[in-house]
Amino acid sequence: MQEDYFGITSLTEMHSFSSPKDFVDMLIDKGAYVRKKVISLNENKVKDSLESSRDMKESIFKFIVSTYINLIDSKIYNRACPLESKCYGLTSKKQKQIALNEFNSIYNELELDSINLTKKTKSESGIMRYGATSKLKIIKYALEGEKSNISNNQELVFEYLTGNKEYFDFNLLKEDQTLSRFLDRYSKFQFLIQLNDTYKFEPDWYFSTDAKIREAHKKYSEIIPNEIIFIHTYRKISQFKTDKIASTNSLYCTLFNLGYLDDSSHKLFKKFILAEFNISISKILNPDSHINDSHQQRISKFSKEFEDLDV
């Protein structure tokens, strides 16, 4: 499946098809659209529905953001600067309270109440607790909804698919309310994410680097099921600048010795580090082998780090 759908077709190609269906079938073959079955309650039957594919939604979203990034940055800047002036010279506690008030004000402007997500946890005494879920999680869901709205704008999508870059100018914002609304809401989302990153209102499991690592864990949970151990492993390998192969081998031995990997893990681990970090290791070291003092020192250092984690 391709990542960029900009200009995958043209007016000339469209007119070369004998029927609109054949043209649509071509776009489906290229991965831009998918057919889904939907139930029509009015007609009491199942009908075919055409939707933008997940990859296409992501592709057009990235294109729109990169095309109008200066406007987005300007919108964020116009919110950030007054807030910084308001917080200047105040204690950290007062700054955080002012920032929180700003966060809640913008969050309420976005009217996200329709996204009804709840969380259920159990206390140490065994009592079930119910409450509202993370605001960042709701922002994540809302952003996915905005991507769908953009991909449902048929005229905009057509110009995108036919590679008409000139179409996406600032005059378009006056004519296309869907696009204008998206850019306004996206800039607010980004500012809220920025505020949370600065003032730590809640842990960011949705937009930070750790969030991306959590997504990777979904693919590689078979290797290291424990999410905290996986996140620390991913961070460590990302930090290796020199002796990457030796350091990665020492890390593998550490994980094995601590019981986070087993005898069947080495092949999957090699695929993981090649896919995520472009580190190619022809042979994983035997964890029981004493290779050299540097190897043993790395294992001791890594072991201490993992043992200090709150797992």
Image: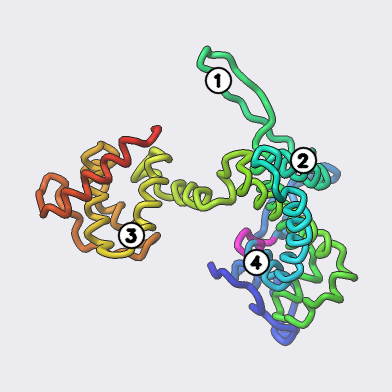
Amino acid at dot 3: Phe
Q: Residue visible at 32% across and 40% down?
A: 306
Q: Residues within 10 Å of mark 1 (few under 14, many from 20)?
A: few
Secondary structure of the residue carrying numbered label 3: loop
Report the front residue among 287 and 115.
287
Camera-near label (1 vs 2) is 2
Secondary structure of the residue carrying numbered label 1: strand
Sooner in the amino-acid sequence: mark 2 or mark 4: 4
Sooner in the amino-acid sequence: mark 3 or mark 2: 2
Could you say which disc has been placed on residue 101 in the image?
Answer: 2
Camera-near label (3 vs 4) is 3
Report the front residue among 45 and 60.
60
Amino acid at dot 4: Lys
State the CA–CA distance, disc 3 to disc 2: 40 Å
Q: Which residue is mark 1?
A: 122
Q: Which residue is mark 4?
A: 62
Amino acid at dot 2: Asn
State the CA–CA distance, disc 1 to disc 3: 39 Å
Looking at the rendering, the stretch of residues picked out in magenta corresponds to 52-57
Image height of 23 relative to 227, above or below? below
State the CA–CA distance, disc 2 to disc 4: 30 Å
Secondary structure of the residue carrying numbered label 4: helix
Question: Is the image coloured rainbow, by chain, by secondary structure, or in one colour?
Answer: rainbow
Q: Which residue is mark 3?
A: 240
Residue 116 placement: quadrant: top right
Report the front residue among 301 and 288.
301
Question: Is residue 273 shown left or right of residue 254?
Answer: right
Amino acid at dot 1: Lys
